[in-house]
Amino acid sequence: MADIHEVSPAVLQRLATEQRLLIDGEWRNATGGAATDVVNPSDGELLTTAAAAAIADTDAAVAAARRTFDGRAWNGLTPSQRGKILWRIG
């Protein structure tokens, strides 16, 4: 049985690259290229670096969410379908 603290190679590979923003179905760098360190709170170890959203990024994400909501694409899905999408993104 695997140790619960073991991290899979796929996760390690993902953490080795800067985490980007998912806005309107596409992965993007933050406007201006800002990034922030993500640290393990239990030991202070650097886990990865993530894009730090600027106001323009946040506005774009909100606008994309509003379009999706108003277009009823998300509302037309069952909870199970929504869950599958969220798990796939996560």
Image (cartoon, rainbow, N blue to C red):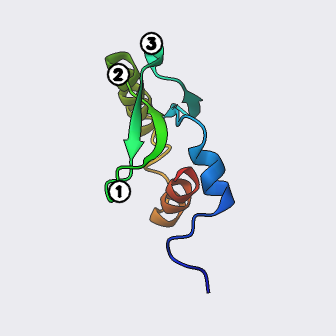
Binning the other alpha carbons within 10 Å of mark 1 as few (below 14), some (14 to 19) or many (20 upward) gives few
Which circle marks residue 32 in the picture? 3
**Amino acid at pointer 3:** Gly
Q: Earlier in the sequence, mark 1 or mark 3?
A: 3
Q: In this rendering, is residue 82 above or below 68?
A: below
Q: Earlier in the sequence, mark 2 or mark 3?
A: 3
Q: In this rendering, is residue 8 above or below 24?
A: below
**Amino acid at pointer 1:** Asp
Q: Position of residue 30 (x, y in %)?
A: 46, 22
Are discs 1 and 3 less than 8 Å apart at CB?
no
Which residue in the structure is indicated by mark 2? 59
Q: Nearer the viewer, residue 79 or 14?
A: 14
Binning the other alpha carbons within 10 Å of mark 3 as few (below 14), some (14 to 19) or many (20 upward) gives few
Q: Secondary structure at mark 2?
A: helix
Q: In this rendering, is residue 32 above or below 75?
A: above
Q: Earlier in the sequence, mark 2 or mark 1?
A: 1
User: What is the spatial separation of the Cα atoms under label 1 and label 3, in whole angstroms?
Assistant: 30 Å
User: What is the spatial separation of the Cα atoms under label 2 and label 1, in whole angstroms?
Assistant: 34 Å
Q: Secondary structure at mark 3?
A: helix
Q: Nearer the viewer, residue 46 or 38?
A: 46
User: What is the spatial separation of the Cα atoms under label 2 and label 3, in whole angstroms?
Assistant: 15 Å
Q: Nearer the viewer, mark 1 or mark 3?
A: 1
Give the image quarter of residue 63: top left
Which residue in the structure is indicated by mark 1? 43
